[in-house]
Amino acid sequence: MGTIHLFRKPQRSFFGKLLREFRLVAADRRSWKILLFGVINLICTGFLLMWCSSTNSIALTAYTYLTIFDLFSLMTCLISYWVTLRKPSPVYSFGPAFLCMSCSVSQTTFLHQSEMMLLSRP
């Protein structure tokens, strides 16, 4: 006879699952360049945001929004790379190539629309 387990193992939280998938992507050397550019972009964007708040320059604000868009584009690259690492399964019925393409297109469309809303505000 086996051991009786009254309680199941606790399921991982959302952040635990997210951290596990991030480690999967970060373990591959090809994604290090994207992660490095993302960290550099994040530092530069923080510096530009502080500079924008002190100068109130419209051109500098537009450039800062452009760097934020670039940061989201790098995140799209990481998501696309994560999808290519996934194996086909019943959850991903169309295969990783189709999922990668549709994810990239929808996220880029959303980013373009949100950037235009930020730039067109008075």
Image (cartoon, rainbow, N blue to C red):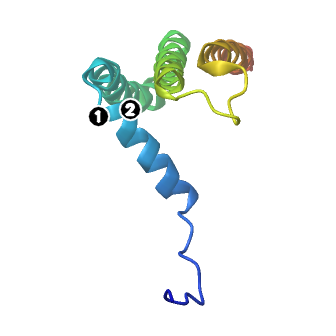
**Which residue type carries mark 2?**
Val
81 is higher (above) or lower (below) than 54: above
Q: Quadrant of residue 5?
A: bottom right
Considering the image in quadrants, where does the C terminus appear?
A: top right
Where is residue 48? Give x, y as percent. Answer: 39, 24
Rendering quarter of residue 98:
top right
Residue 17: image location, x then y, percent: 51, 52
Q: Which residue is located at x 33 percent, y 26 percent? A: 35
Give the residue drawn at x 51%, y 22%.
Answer: 68
Left or right of 112 in this view: 69: left
Q: Position of residue 97 (x, y in %)?
A: 61, 13
Outermost residue on the front side: it is: 1
Taking depth in this image into account, of 26 and 70 the one nearest to the observer is: 26
Which element carries disc 1, helix, strand or loop?
A: loop
Write down the residue under mark 1.
Answer: 27
Instruction: Give the distance between the C-alpha atoms of the residues marked 1 and 2, in whole angstroms.
Output: 5 Å
Residue drawn at the location 50% of the way across and 20% of the way down: 84
Tell me where residue 117 appears, x and y as whole percent: 74, 19
Please name whichever residue, 6 or 114, is drawn nearer the observer in this view of the structure: 6
Asked whether disc 1 touches disc 2, contact meaning CB atoms under 8 Å apart, the reply is: yes
Query: What residue does disc 2 label?
Result: 25
In the image, what residue type sits under mark 1? Ala
Q: Is residue 84 above or below residue 49?
A: above
Quadrant position of residue 11: bottom right
Question: Residue at the location (60% across, 90% down)?
Answer: 6
Q: Nearer the viewer, residue 108 or 69?
A: 108
Residue 97, numbered label: none
